[in-house]
Each structure stands twice: as structure tokens, then as C-alpha cells.
Amino acid sequence: MSHEDTPKGAKITFQVDGRACEGFHHESLLGALRRLGFEVPSLCFHEAVSTYGACRLCLVEVQKGRKSRITTSCNFPVTAGLQVRLDTPAVQQNRKIVFQLLLAKAPASPEVRALAAEYGVHSTPYKVSEEAKDNKCILCGLCARVCTEVVGANAIAFSGRGSHKDMVAPYDEAAEACIGCGACVEVCPTHCIGLRETPEIRTIEKWHRDLPLQKCEKCGRPFAPTFQLMTLGKRVGMKLSDFKVCNDCR
Amino acid sequence: MDDAKLKSIIEKHDRDPANLLAILMDIQKEERWLPKETLKALAAEMNLPLARVYALATFFAAFSLKPRGKHLCTVCMGTACHVRGAPRLVDHIQREFDVLAGNTTADMKLTLETVNCVGACALGPLVIVDGEYHGNMNAGKMDRVLKPIKQE
Ligand code: SF4
Ligand code: SF4
Ligand code: FES
Ligand code: FES
């Protein structure tokens, strides 16, 4: 059977460092490697959303037939007979450069520094610009993908391009479409979005969004932003009044 | 941009989100730039996320999110023009019109911009005023070219 005929998701075998492994036709190679328990560094991949291939960290060497090459594994499809090598000199060399670039891009991120250190990279030869000095964001776009594809709020997106590329709320003002669910905060690999909460208000810091919290009618505990309840309620055809009690009291 | 005008542009493009780029171009043609209020109204009218409209508007250098004046003066700051005195020209215009490069005068008369090489290096320093190329520029010639605008 040729690969074109293999249905997506069919069980196949491929090799990792010479070991036979089971995978599913056309699944993400990085996803498969993780499930199989292999360690591959990565910052921009999440099973729940589309892949973007932004951080370039998940490099592996793949071989199909005689040709061997280096590729990012998150956006590489698994196929039968694929041979994967995880830690070749070429992978190490390229990964080192990627780490150095990331260290220059987000020098203020402890997460990037820690991961780089795990792979033996402790400094960068690249110049850190004055604006980048305090930056933690690696522009992986995971926050926006989650907000669009999972939450459906479409509150944030990349702006500009090239050296002006940025991840901001529109006009870098309060993101009016943000429902304050905190999904982006959770998923951000460098924890640079920030969520603050008082008994009255939840703030998503990077998007300048302040959202009043709904208090449970029974126990009085604030449990979710009112705007979030309204938006989600509208989607499923319920009114805010249907949501005035927290999960614990229901 | 008033509501009716915006709606007519949207209708002209069949209210199709696939035509968002063309819609933005039409707005820019009318207004010379993309005002924030117009983009917000556009997103609401077409039921599109503002984040998406903003992402597209900031992606292309041809769009301006800052007000643009009636006249456009672009000074080439490419290497060749740079060594032949383009920075001094920029300084000069900034002083004469009380505007910083990349911005527009308070009376919306003139926008001053810089670019990197327009491919006419032999003529440097080069200045483009409302689409017209002026080579071998100096402060005196610059004043003459910009005089009609100043006197408007
Ligand atoms: S907190 Fe706001 S921006 Fe973040 S995922 Fe939720 S809705 Fe989107
Ligand atoms: S804020 Fe976080 S998730 Fe969003 S692009 Fe930056 S690093 Fe990635
Ligand atoms: S995880 Fe593959 S490029 Fe980031
Ligand atoms: S540097 Fe000015 S035209 Fe080339």
C-alpha cells in the first residue's frame, strides 16, 4: 500500500534511534515522540491547537529512503518506515543556534534560560537590542492560537511583521473581545501574559483587560468574569441569570 | 469616515471577509490613512474580530495607522543618499514644518517620511514630493520645492 492510500490516523510503525515505535499515519512527529516518552525541547507546540513551527527548537533528523535531513518535528507528519534520530551532531549544532537566538530575543525569560541551560547553552553571541532587554515573549503565537481555536474569542493576534512583529491586543489597548478565561495565560511558554485578581476584578495584564467578577449568589465567592459568563451564555443560548451560582453551590 | 461611506465600501466588496484587504485599501484611498474608529466600525459592521483587522492593517507597510497629511514628502535615507547629506535634509524639513520624520504636521498639510533606497542612488540625495522625484537635493532646493505647500 502506498502512503497516499494510507488513511490518516491508521496505525503504522516508524523508527526512533533505531527502535521500532508505533505511531499514527500523519500525526505530528513531535506529538508522537512525546507520547512515546522521548524528550524533545519545544516551546510553541500544543496538542490542542494547530502547529505553527515558530520556536524551531523541536529539531530532529529524519530519513526516508536514503536522504537524511534536519527538520522541526512538530509540523512533520509521521509515516510508515520513517527513521528519526534525536540527538545527532547536526541536531545539536542547530539547536544550539536556535537557543542562542531565543536568548537574544527574550533575554528576560527565566523559562527560556532554564531550558537553554538544560541543553548546555548559557549565553548568546547575538546582540540584545535595547528594546529586547526586558522582553519575555518569544512570539510563538500560542496565546492567539488558543484564543482563536479553542476559546473562540479572537481577542489577540500578531501585529506588524519582520522586526516590528509583536503580539498585542489591537492598538495595544484593552482587548475588548477578551473574556478573561486565562487560557492564554496558562499556555504561554514564558509566562509573560500575567493574570491578577482582586475580589472584584480580574486583570489580564498583557492585554490590558480588566473584567469585573461575578459573585456567586449563594456563597458570595467571585467565580468568573461576568463578561465571560455572558459571552459563553450567549453561545449556548442561556442568560446571565442562569449563571449566578458557582459550580460548588450548584 | 462616516458610516454611510464605510457601508458603501463594504457593500462594494460584497461584505466578503475575503475582500478585507481590498476594503482596507479603499478606506486608505479615501482617508489617506486607516483611522482607529473606522477600523473598529469596520470590524463591528462585518462581524470580524478587531484583532484580525488590526493584524492585517499592521502587516503591510503600505497601510498607515497614523494620520497622513494632504501632501507626502519622502526623503531617501539609503546608504548613498545618507552619505550625501540626507540626514541634514530631514533635519531641515523637520525644522521648517515643525514635524518629526514619520509624522504629520498638526494642520494635516504634510507628512514627512523616510525610506531606505528607492533605486535612484546616482541622483542622491533624493526626495519624493507627492510622487515627483527631486534629485541632488539641498536645503535651498528643498525650500523651493516645498514652498507652494507651505503657502497653501
Ligand atoms: S484570557 Fe482573553 S485573550 Fe486570553 S485566551 Fe481568554 S479570551 Fe483570549
Ligand atoms: S505572549 Fe506567550 S504565548 Fe503569546 S506569543 Fe508571546 S510567548 Fe507566545
Ligand atoms: S515546537 Fe516545533 S517549532 Fe516550536
Ligand atoms: S540610497 Fe537613495 S536612492 Fe538609493
Image (spheres, coloured by chain):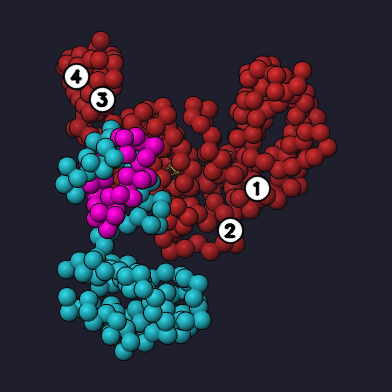
Identified at 58% across, 57% down, the residue is: A123
Q: Is residue A99 left or right of residue A155?
A: right
Chain to which mark 3 belongs: A
- Indicate whether residue B20 is drawn in magenta: yes
Residues indicated by labels 2 and 1 sit on the same polypeptide chain: yes
**Residue B147 placement (x, y as % from top left):** 23, 82
Q: Which comes before the other along the chain, label 2 or label 3?
A: 2
- Along the line of sight, the residue nearer the viewer: A91 or A81: A81
Q: In the rendered image, which residue does mark 4 sit on? A: A240
Q: Position of residue A121 (x, y in %)?
A: 62, 52
The magenta-colored residue range is B13-42
Marks 2/1: CA distance? 13 Å
Earlier in the chain: of badge 1 and badge 3, it is 1
| Discs 2, 3: same chain | yes
- Where is mark 1, residue-wise? A95
> In the rendered picture, chain A carries what hue?
red
- Identify residue for label 3: A231
Q: Identify the chain of the residue marked 4, using the numbered disc in the image.
A: A
* Numbered disc 1: secondary structure: helix
Q: Residues within 10 Å of mark 4 (few under 14, many from 20)?
A: some
- Image marks 2 and 4: residues in contact by CB distance under 8 Å: no
Give the residue at the far top of this rendering: A250
Q: Which residue is mark 2?
A: A124
- Quarter where residue A15 is shown: top right
Q: SS at mark 2?
A: loop
Badge 1 or badge 4: first in the primary sequence: 1
Instruction: Name the one closer to the observer, A122 or A14.
Output: A14
